[in-house]
Amino acid sequence: MITANQLRSFTEQIFIAIGCSETDARLAADVLVSADLRGVDSHGVARLPGYVRLYDIGRLNPQPHIKIVHESPSTAVVDGDRGLGLVVGPWAMQVAIEKARIAGTGWVAVRNSNHFGIAGYHALLATEHDMIGQAMTHAAPLVAPTFSLDKLLGTNPIAVAIPAATEPTFLADFASTAVAYGKLEILQRKGQNIPEGWAQNAEGQPTTDANAVRNGGALLPLGTDREHGSHKGYGLGAIVDIFSGVLSGANYGPWVPPFATAGFMKADEGVGVGTGHFFGAMRIDAFRPADEFKTHMDTWIQRFRQAKAMEGHQVLIPGDPERMMEAERLASGIPVVEPVIKSLEELGERFGVKL
């Protein structure tokens, strides 16, 4: 087990070593470690070597000049200048929050960024201001639309954070695919198979091979197949891609550049600039008094918690599993698998930072 503070300090020092400012390094480390604390290990410090590789190949600018390139009273387009998405994301969400203060809602599309970590981190920023936060991002094409053999979409997650009065914040944060690719990477490191329904092989057939996507196969949309609603997952992923890429001026569809850890993929950019995201902030009192709304959110949450559940189960609220995991890992530490520890130690040796 490694404590959150140990991981945070190590990660921060690595980002500083590649040229990030102390402020940006601290923020980027916090985004990654928050994923590990919440149990989203696929998007935590396991990704750190990938960000360093992005820097090595010139796709990551550690000192970006992030700026608004187009705006209206309630909207903006932000250019991330090839910065860490872990830094560009919170910057853009702050713009959305400021727009919402003035106009009631704020909507920000981002281009020329990189992987931004877990979507929920960014959505939660709005709830600190009695606002509803939304965050989404597209990703490299690992996903085959329903009936397709071609990979045309990313895992394309969506997050919505809604504050309550005394109950914990409602946070729905999920990929538009059956599973995030990072979970396949975890099973690849362990040498284990994946459950059927996560991916298809190069011929479009169901598979349990964790390396199927690397070998010509594809991840599947949420729903897995047409009979179980994969067209709906495909639709969600398409919406995220259009909002994040077509609307912002970033690349989109099969042209979204891969994260550095996807070494079997090539960056085939050409229709836009870098990776894109999309953020929203909605001021609650633009609809009804915030305290009144949050009290009713308490009622909503409590009623769902009281739902009669199947034997051996409990009805949870979106965000509950991650909150419970965070409490556990803050108390007992974060488990990091041996291959990830090895990759972090190699980074430490390169930059003179001890894990």
Image: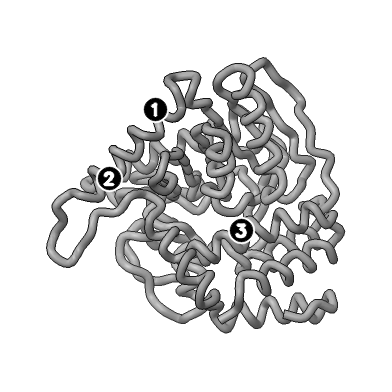
Tag 1: Cα neighbours inside 10 Å, few (<14), some, or many (≥20)?
few
The tag on residue 302 is: 2
Q: Secondary structure at mark 2?
A: helix
The residue lying at 55 percent from left, 22 percent from top is: 105
Residue that label 3 marks: 265
**Marks 3 and 2, how far apart in space?**
46 Å
**Marks 1 and 2, how far apart in space?**
16 Å
Quarter placement of the N terminus: bottom right
Tell me where residue 89 appears, x and y as whole percent.
66, 43
Tell me where residue 285 appears, x and y as whole percent.
49, 22
Residue that label 1 marks: 292
Quarter placement of the C terminus: bottom right
The kind of residue tagged 1 is Glu
Mark whose residue sits in front, 1 or 3: 1
1 or 2: tag closer to the N-terminus: 1
The residue lying at 48 percent from left, 26 percent from top is: 284
- Quick check: 47 above or below 278? below
- Return the residue nearer the eye: 233 or 207: 233
Residue 298 in sight: yes
Q: Secondary structure at mark 1?
A: helix
- Return the residue nearer the eye: 178 or 309: 309
- Quick check: 25 above or below 240? below
